[in-house]
Amino acid sequence: MFCSFSVLLLVLVVLVSSEAVLSYELNETACSVCTCWARSTCDGDKENPFYDEIRSPDCKSGIIDCRDKSLTELPPIHNGTVTVKEQNQAYGHYYDATYKIGKVWLSGNAFSTIPSDYFVNVSESVTEIYVNNNPDLASFGDGLFSNMPNLRYMIAHYSGLESLGANLFSGSTSLEKLWLHNNQISTIDKDAFKGIGPSLSELYLTENKVSSLDPSTFSGLSGVSELWMMDNLNITKSDISCSHLCDIPENADIKMFDEQVTMLCGTGCTADAGDEAINDDGANACGYNSCVTWDLNSGWRAGWGVWKVTVVCGVLSFLLSYSIEFV
């Protein structure tokens, strides 16, 4: 009996020791209502949707995981590191290991803003920031995500953001995915995306309340492959011109409107019969040597209609074949 109890106790000790434990700095009052785990990426962040493509092979990155804790205050990040328990594979014992913070997961909380200096101690090391599903999050501090040379993913969809200020991402030249859809954004400063450069591939602004866009808003985003802005009810065809898209690659997937809308930019442009076209009337604001054509429709509702027809036809075909078989 004593032996069984000892074995059980030993197992519990090993299990507890194998968990990555927060350093003292991260267990202060801001996290008093929760335990925010910090861990090495060796633990395997398989809940991350990008796990397969971004898992650090050398496991030299710390994670602050404060998801779904209903925090009204942000957990402090003082020295930009986390201390975790790791096991020596050769000898089996555990030891403290300190890593720079590479990932910050703050989704599913209740704070209303993130101040400008919040990420200052992790600006050089952070590669991912998740602040999505925070309905009370209304604002970012000035330049909050600027000068983060290794930041790749900034995910903030399904929150309560109301505006995007100037130079918010300036100097974050590795940024690839910027998800800002399903917020309350009504104002985007013309310099909000300035300084990101060609690294950005996905910019999602779907289902916000944007009422106008300066023609230079997307300047410099020459690597964008997906620019989605549909279901911004205050944006109409008259608000979009060729000037908005000068730096966007011709083969980019642009979704702005529910109906079929074609934008013609450059010289020698002729709309196809039946197209609702936006033409720059020869102004050639982008300096193209030929005609560049953009399809600005989302395709979602059109696709849904086609899908419904396909399903109905499939069901009817099945019923008809079934009836013939038993006649």
Image (tube, helix red, strand yellow):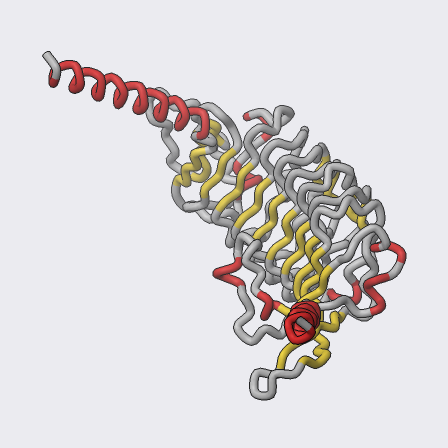
Q: Residue at x 77, y 44 (%)?
A: 70
* Among the 4 quarters of the image, the one containing residue 171: bottom right
Q: Is residue 14 left or right of residue 141?
A: left
Q: What residue do we see at 58% from left, 35% from top?
A: 206
Left or right, 128 with respect to 116, comes to left
Give how far across and how far down residue 46 sits, in percent.
Answer: 54, 58
Horizontal and vertical percent for residue 159? 70, 39
Pick the quarter of the image with the N terminus: bottom right
**In the orientation shown, which residue stands out farthest toward the top?**
327
Q: Nearer the viewer, residue 231 or 14?
A: 14
Q: Residue at x 49, y 25 (%)?
A: 258
Q: Residue furthest right?
A: 29
- Nearest the viewer among 101 and 108 is 108
- Residue 193 versus residue 96: which sits nearer the camera? 96
Location of residue 311 (image quadrant): top left
Instruction: Give the camera-side residue of 283 and 317.
Output: 317
Could you tell me how many numbered marks the image carries? 0
Q: Is residue 221 visible?
A: yes
| Residue 69 screen position, x and y as percent | 75, 48
Q: State the image coordinates of residue 127 (x, y, percent, origin top left).
A: 63, 63
Question: In the visual, does 284 lie left or right of 208?
Answer: left
Residue 18 appears anywhere in the view? no
x 70%, y 50%: residue = 67
Q: Is residue 244 above or below residue 142?
A: above
Give the quadrant of residue 118.
Answer: bottom right
Q: Which quarter of the rendering shows the C terminus?
A: top left
Q: Residue furthest bottom?
A: 91
Q: Is residue 130 above or below residue 1?
A: above
Does 273 sit above or below residue 157? Answer: above
